[in-house]
Image: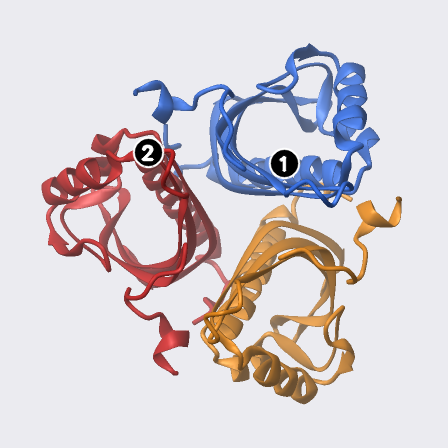
Chain colours: A orange, B blue, C red
């Protein structure tokens, strides 16, 4: 679960880690700044994206269309990414788990801010020299204001 | 307070930093996913753990027992770790200060979410090739909903 | 927008990234621990600092004076920095965008906690071997409790 960090290839892997982290933040900015076409620089064309709210989607066009649709009601969003844990599974592939606190403020001021506490479970691949998301699965630890539903995270699945 | 990052050993230290960060996130996941036995991979056996809620504890068995007890009332938790500042004090030792925003949702839906804004002040050592927490002291900047008590952080100690 | 991370100078740049991140966290601690003189170690003397609340300021003395004044009403603050994206523009210069969730608790218990969701848009330079902030511009995605005003972030500027 925790990558061994030692030996000769550590240095390359540190660069790879930085490159993957940069792409994670690019994802957040593409969402928060409503520059959704930039998701094309983060995902592979034939990506998979699943979340409790989107269901399973395939292909970057579908993802961008969905982003444009679901982001429209918001005045602002902010996706804070933290706890990025990367495990390399091959020269050009990695698994990553990260936490996100996604804050959403509605254009309609009568609706309270919505906050998603989630996890990203990703499969990353390096294609044409660039690390990209091949699969992203969003787990939901909880939503504020509290409501039922969502895909249980491992903690909740135990109960 | 801020580590000088230059010279020959910088590269090794970057690997050490990544290894310590990985362990910090493993701590969060062991807590949030209720896989508390994984704390045995993060702490040394003869660790010290202190917090405003636990008092001073010694030994990994005591820590895991305490985790199991205090985490039971929650439906979900999420520990966002940020602002990780590491200062190496020797080849196999480091001090680290980090911020945590620990969100807690109760199984009892009538109780509001509890959020701890805290700091981890850690002593890390490398033992048998793995970086582990020898001492973790949790400071509390504040708790939501607001309540009295807690160990003051340096800011509050000045007032 | 996303730095290419490859080739010979990657290793130096990884060290530079770590050094800049350390300084970002030092900024947060100087603020949160009310050790505002430590901002002198983070900014260059002739720095620029602008935010919706401060307007444009120039010079580290002005910044420290302002910090002392605006931080006085709080019992505690915590500045969580995340999504740090650094783009090097020269051997000794870089642009950085980061997210901040700045939590403020008032000494006056009748006032609710105030939270700023913001972005730091920085110009960094290396001077005398140390990376420092030459310019910091704070953008505001939103404030809780909700109120009008603030400098719109790129998302809001599109609407």
* Residue at image mark 1: B24
Say which of C110 and C2 sits in front: C110
Chain under callout 2: C
Q: Residue at x 37, y 45 (%)?
A: C24
Q: Is residue B87 above or below residue C26?
A: above
Q: Quadrant location of residue A140? A: bottom right
Q: Label 2's element?
A: loop
- What is the distance, in whole Å, between disc 1 and disc 2 at their CAs? 35 Å
In contact (CB < 8 Å): disc 1 and disc 2: no
Say which of B141 and A39 sits in front: B141
Q: Quadrant location of residue B36? A: top right
Circle number at residue C108: 2
Q: Position of residue B103 (x, y in %)?
A: 62, 42
Left/right of residue C117 with respect to residue B66 in the rendered view: left
Q: Is residue B71 above or below residue A122?
A: above
Q: Residue at x 82, y 48 (%)?
A: A156
Q: Position of residue A119 (x, y in %)?
A: 69, 56
Q: Position of residue A3 (x, y in %)?
A: 72, 44
Q: Quadrant location of residue A158? A: top right
């Amino acid at each position: 679960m925790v990558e061994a960090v030692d030996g000769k290839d550590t240095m390359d892997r540190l660069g790879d880690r930085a490159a993957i982290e940069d792409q994670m933040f690019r994802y957040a900015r593409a969402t928060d700044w409503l520059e959704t076409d930039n998701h094309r620089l983060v995902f592979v064309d034939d990506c998979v994206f699943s979340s409790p709210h989107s269901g399973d989607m395939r292909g970057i066009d579908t993802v961008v269309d969905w982003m444009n649709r679901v982001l429209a009601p918001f005045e602002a969003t902010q996706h804070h990414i933290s706890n990025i844990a990367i495990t390399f599974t091959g020269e050009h592939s990695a698994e990553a788990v990260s936490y996100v606190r996604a804050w959403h403020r509605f254009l309609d001021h009568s609706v309270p801010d919505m906050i998603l506490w989630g996890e990203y479970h990703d499969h990353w691949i390096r294609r044409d020299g660039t690390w990209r998301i091949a699969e992203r699965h969003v787990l939901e630890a909880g939503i504020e204001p509290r409501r039922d539903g969502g895909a249980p995270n491992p903690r909740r699945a135990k109960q």
